[in-house]
């Protein structure tokens, strides 16, 4: 089963109700987000990011979506590797997830060696909703080696 199919199945099962494991639901959501980034699927992120989104840099939802859209337009091929290092549930409808992400993108019209951008990030997400309705309401990210992005 592909990663996309596995993530979609996990999210579909979580959305069906029944006994769900919020931590597994959140981990599946991170996998689905990585797959959507590789597919350059802006629509996925429009659904994932809450209308009330604000981050530590003062960005709102539309600014973040425009940043994502710009990255997708600039890079014709994107590879993402993630590792969830922490999931903290704060009640039934709030959570904090810390993700280590390696991202590499090849710029449109560039050779593999000349147009490759890559970096490591530590991403801290604040989510609300619960039970298959998780949305990102805030985020903080920094380069993996300590620099801010």
Image (cartoon, rainbow, N blue to C red):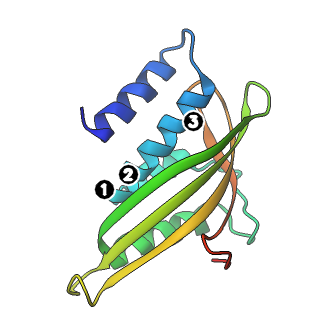
Could you tell whether 36 is left or right of 47 in the image?
A: left
Measured from the top left, where is residue 59 in percent x and y? 69, 68
Could you tell whether 91 is left or right of 1 in the image?
A: right
Q: Residues within 10 Å of mark 2 (few under 14, many from 20)?
A: some
Q: Residue at x 74, y 24 (%)?
A: 92
Q: Residues within 10 Å of mark 3 (few under 14, many from 20)?
A: many
Residue 149 vertical placement versus 82 (above, below): below
Residue 38 vertical placement versus 104 (above, below): above
Q: Residue at x 38, y 71 (%)?
A: 104
SS for dot 3: helix
Marks 2 and 1: in contact by CB < 8 Å?
yes
Could you tell whether 149 is left or right of 95 in the image?
A: left
SS for dot 1: loop
Measured from the top left, where is residue 108 in percent x and y? 26, 81
Q: Residue at x 61, y 30 (%)?
A: 23
Q: Which mark is residue 26?
A: 3
Question: Which mark is in front, 1 or 3?
Answer: 3
Residue picked out by circle 1: 39
**Disc 3 versus disc 2: distance between alpha carbons?**
15 Å
**Disc 1 versus disc 3: distance between alpha carbons?**
20 Å
Q: Quadrant of residue 39?
A: bottom left
Outermost residue to the top: 18
SS for dot 2: helix
Marks 2 and 3: in contact by CB < 8 Å?
no
Residue 123 vertical placement versus 89 (above, below): below
Q: Residues within 10 Å of mark 1 (few under 14, many from 20)?
A: some
Question: Which mark is in front, 3 or 2?
Answer: 3
**Which callout, 1 or 3, points at the residue further toward the start of the chain?**
3
Q: Which mark is residue 133?
A: none
Residue 89 vertical placement versus 37 (above, below): above
Residue picked out by circle 2: 36
**Which callout, 3 or 2, points at the residue further toward the start of the chain?**
3
């Amino acid at each position: 089963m592909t990663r996309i199919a596995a993530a979609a199945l996990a999210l579909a099962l979580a959305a069906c109700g029944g006994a769900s494991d919020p931590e597994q639901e959140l981990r599946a959501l991170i996998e689905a987000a990585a797959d959507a980034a590789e597919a350059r699927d802006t629509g996925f992120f429009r659904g994932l990011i809450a209308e009330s989104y604000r981050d530590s840099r003062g960005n709102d939802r539309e600014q973040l979506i425009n940043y994502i859209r710009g990255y997708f337009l600039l890079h014709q091929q994107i590879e993402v590797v993630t590792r969830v290092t922490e999931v903290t549930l704060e009640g039934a409808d709030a959570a904090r997830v810390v993700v280590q992400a390696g991202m590499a993108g090849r710029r449109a019209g560039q050779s593999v060696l000349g147009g490759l951008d890559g970096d490591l990030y530590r991403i801290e997400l604040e989510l609300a909703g619960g039970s298959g309705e998780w949305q990102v309401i805030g985020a903080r990210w920094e380069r993996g080696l300590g620099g801010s992005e």
